[in-house]
Image: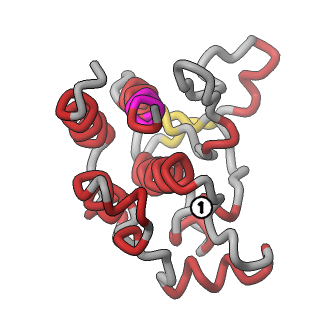
Amino acid sequence: DCLLQIDDVARGVEYLHSRKPPICHGDLKSVSCSTSVIAHVPNLNLSPEDQHITTHCPSTNTITLTCKHYTVRWAAPELVAEDESSLASDIWALGWVAYEVMTNYIPFHDVKEPKVINRIVRGDLPSVSNDTRMMLMQALCSLVGQCWSVDPSKRPAAKDCRESMEWMVSDAGLR
């Protein structure tokens, strides 16, 4: 079920963000999340030869798994404005993962890649309440809207996302 997949990814993001120091995935997207029975967040078990792709940011005391690489369609506004990946940019991407799983559309599916950055910067995002499947899940729409806050400081923490998803899954009788 879609809610279980989103819940699994939210749990993976919470796991990363709750490490000491917190780990920022940096390039979360649903195509990088397995959608078989249990979704998972890749790049959690880095081999020693892959350690070079991680970076440590002393000012925020976080580790980023993908260095400065990200995929534009899932990128938060601050990333396309040349800022660093952050825990908040992972939350933005988590909102897109939820959107994708529920609608079967990648972010900005209706425009070609060069126009995506303009849409992100303008805050021209799809209305989750206009999608039939998303409308059925008002709580999920609310969570996705919070994840897509243009102000990174207004996005929920991974723990809050996981708790919201856990409530939705429980309320739907799925776990």
Secondary element at image label 1: loop
The residue nearer to you, when weighing 74 against 98, is: 98
Residue visible at 38% across and 27% down? 11
Residue 88: percent from the left, percent from the top? 40, 53
Q: Residue at x 73, y 79 (%)?
A: 111
The answer to whether residue 21 is seen in the rendering is no
Which of the image's four quarters has the N terminus? top left
Is residue 55 depicted above or below 83 in this figure?
A: above
- Residue 73 or residue 52, whichever sits in front: 73
Segment tinted magenta in the rendering: 4-9
Secondary structure mostly seen in magenta is helix
Q: Which colour scheme is used?
A: secondary structure
In the depicted structure, whether residue 7 falls above or below residue 45? below
Q: Does the magenta stretch include residue 137?
A: no
Judge left or right: residue 149 versus residue 106.
left
Which residue, given by chain and number where applicable, does mark 1 sit on? Answer: 75
- From this view, report whether residue 37 is shown above or below residue 101: above
Neighbor class of circle 1 (other Cα within 10 Å; few <14, some 14-19, many 20+) is many
Q: In this view, does 113 lie above or below 56?
A: below
Question: For this rendering, which residue is in front, 37 or 68?
Answer: 37
Is 121 positioned to the left or the right of 9 in the image?
right
Q: In this view, does 76 lie to the left or right of 174?
A: right
x and y percentages locating residue 167 in the rendered image: 19, 34
**Disc 1 marks which amino acid?**
Ala
In this orientation, which residue lies closer to the viewer: 172 or 140?
172
